[in-house]
Amino acid sequence: MEYVIVLAIVVFILVFKDRPVMVMEFEDGKLTKQKGTIPAGFLNGCKDIAHKQPFSGKIKVYKNRFTTKLVFSKTVPAKVKQRVHNVFPYSGGSKKRSGKRA
């Protein structure tokens, strides 16, 4: 009986654990931590943005079967968020459409 409880706890932790694919942490416009495989163009773009408009905060990238999502900490300004979205290589709309458009 206790094995079932332990197994349920392990499954719960694996399902609901915060597991981003990439993490970048900035402090006053400088990259202090990075985790995951970050494409070189995206990394250089983020460093340039942080150099021109210094900010502090975290940028996390989550990926599932269908989408790739950017998540920013609350300390990242809205203008910086937009600029990071612009240099992000995995933008939506890359699906090929076959047939006629509606």
Image: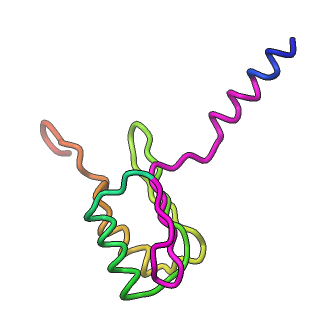
List x then y, in percent, for residue 71. 51, 61
Q: How is the image coloured?
A: rainbow
Q: Is 74 inside the magenta-drawn segment? A: no
Which residue ends up furthest to the left in the rendered image?
Answer: 99
List x then y, in percent, for residue 34. 46, 62
Front residue of this view, candidates 38 and 86: 38
Front residue of this view, candidates 30 and 1: 30
Q: Is residue 85 left or right of residue 62?
A: left
Front residue of this view, candidates 89 and 10: 10
The residue under the point 63% across, 34% down is 15
List x then y, in percent, for residue 49. 36, 80
**Number of numbered callouts drawn:** 0
The N terminus: image quadrant: top right
Which residue ends up furthest to the front in the rendered image?
Answer: 32
Residue 14 appears in which quarter of the rendering?
Answer: top right
| Residue interval drawn in magenta | 8-35
Q: Relative to 26, say whether 1 is above or below.
A: above
Q: Relative to 80, say whether 102 is above or below.
A: above
Q: Relative to 5, say whether 83 is above or below.
A: below
Q: Is residue 23 left or right of residue 97?
A: right
The C terminus: image quadrant: top left
Front residue of this view, candidates 53 and 101: 53
List x then y, in percent, for residue 48. 32, 80
Q: Is residue 76 left or right of residue 41?
A: right
The residue under the point 45% across, 54% down is 22
Q: Is 31 inside the magenta-drawn segment? A: yes
Q: Is residue 83 left or right of residue 22?
A: left
Which residue ends up furthest to the top in the rendered image?
Answer: 1
The residue under the point 36% across, 56% down is 38
